[in-house]
Image: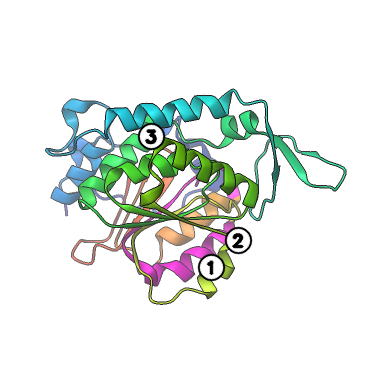
């Protein structure tokens, strides 16, 4: 293991970690993919870059027409004057909440889209990363939200299973998938994550993506339950969302089941990689 690739530091202060590993700062605080010596990590690091000249061979962009349709849908959500009643089973959003006469959290769709949708450049990087992991596979997403990220992930050639706690939000997502034509690659379930986990049979996913419960203890519990059902990698989104979430990330990356861990644009990646030396990285 090359010294430049490994980071042997112990636990990081949550306050400092939230500043250093958020998606805006990480391009400046992380290491370049050029310094990665593991062939697998080198290819993955290239796939996560935005510049096409760095992408691994065969890591072609998604169908341009499908991308255009999904982004038109994103634009319509961002300009929508409609409202949606939110059933939030996670930590929710920092955005101001309004309630109707029944006490339900009522949000403008445009506001929800503004606060929850993953930027196009980031989700396209994740799609390239998936294609570098393998040409097809099974992906579990916890936290569908409005479903735009789910739609882009479905262009990867993988099948996407996605869980969402809010029935009204999931309905909007399903309508959008059908409209853009990617619904055949997506299987959605509505309800509490804990209920879905309790009802699982022998399901195993290549990649599990946690983005639906921004509380540290809940994230740790979900990760514990799904680690045995993760074949390749688990990704924890919004690790810099709060000090509580960053503490959870620090606990997770120290677990024995994960050989390689790295952060990238506010996300934490946990890799089983049994053939590799244990290491922690911070990618730009």
Point out which mark residue 18 bears: none
Determine if the magenta segment contains residue 240: yes
Q: Which residue is mark 1?
A: 196
Q: Quadrant of residue 279?
A: bottom left
- What separation in Å lies between label 3 and label 2 (alpha carbons)? 27 Å
The quadrant in which the C terminus is found is top left
User: What residue do we see at 58% from left, 29% from top?
Assistant: 114
Segment colored magenta? 216-243
What secondary structure is found at the residue carrying circle 1? Answer: helix
What secondary structure is found at the residue carrying circle 3? Answer: helix
What secondary structure is found at the residue carrying circle 2? Answer: loop
Residue 188 position, x and y percent, is 48, 55
- What separation in Å lies between label 1 and label 3 (alpha carbons)? 28 Å
* Cβ–Cβ under 8 Å for marks 2 and 1: yes
Residue 30 position, x and y percent, is 34, 36
**72 with respect to 101 (left or right):** left
Q: Which residue is mark 3?
A: 122
User: What residue do we see at 23% from left, 67% from top?
Assistant: 274
**132 with respect to 256 (left or right):** left
Label located before the other in sequence (3 or 2): 3
């Amino acid at each position: 293991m090359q010294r430049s690739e490994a980071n042997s530091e112990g636990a990081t202060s949550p306050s400092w970690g939230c500043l250093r590993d958020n998606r805006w700062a990480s391009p400046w605080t992380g290491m370049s993919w050029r310094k990665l010596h593991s062939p697998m990590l080198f290819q993955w690091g290239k796939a996560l870059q935005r510049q096409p000249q760095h992408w691994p061979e065969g890591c072609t962009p998604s169908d341009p027409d499908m991308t255009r349709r999904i982004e038109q849908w994103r634009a319509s959500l961002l300009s929508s004057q409609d409202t949606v009643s939110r059933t939030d089973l996670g930590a929710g959003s920092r955005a101001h909440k309004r309630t109707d006469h029944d006490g339900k959290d009522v949000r403008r769709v445009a506001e929800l889209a503004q606060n929850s949708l993953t930027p196009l450049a980031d989700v396209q990087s994740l799609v390239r990363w998936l294609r570098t992991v393998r040409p097809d596979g099974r992906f579990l997403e916890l936290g569908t939200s409005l479903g735009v990220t789910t739609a882009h992930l479905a262009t990867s050639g993988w099948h996407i299973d996605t869980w969402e706690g809010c029935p009204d939000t999931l309905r909007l997502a399903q309508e959008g998938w059908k409209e853009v034509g990617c619904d055949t690659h997506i299987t959605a379930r509505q309800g509490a994550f804990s209920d879905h986990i309790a009802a699982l049979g022998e399901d195993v996913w290549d990649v599990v993506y946690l983005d639906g419960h921004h509380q540290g203890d809940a994230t740790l519990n979900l990760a514990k339950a799904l680690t045995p059902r993760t074949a390749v990698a688990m990704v924890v989104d919004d690790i810099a969302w709060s000090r509580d979430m960053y503490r959870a990330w620090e606990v997770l990356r120290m677990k024995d089941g994960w050989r390689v861990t790295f952060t990238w644009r506010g996300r934490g990646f946990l890799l089983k990689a049994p053939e590799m030396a244990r290491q922690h990285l911070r990618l730009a």
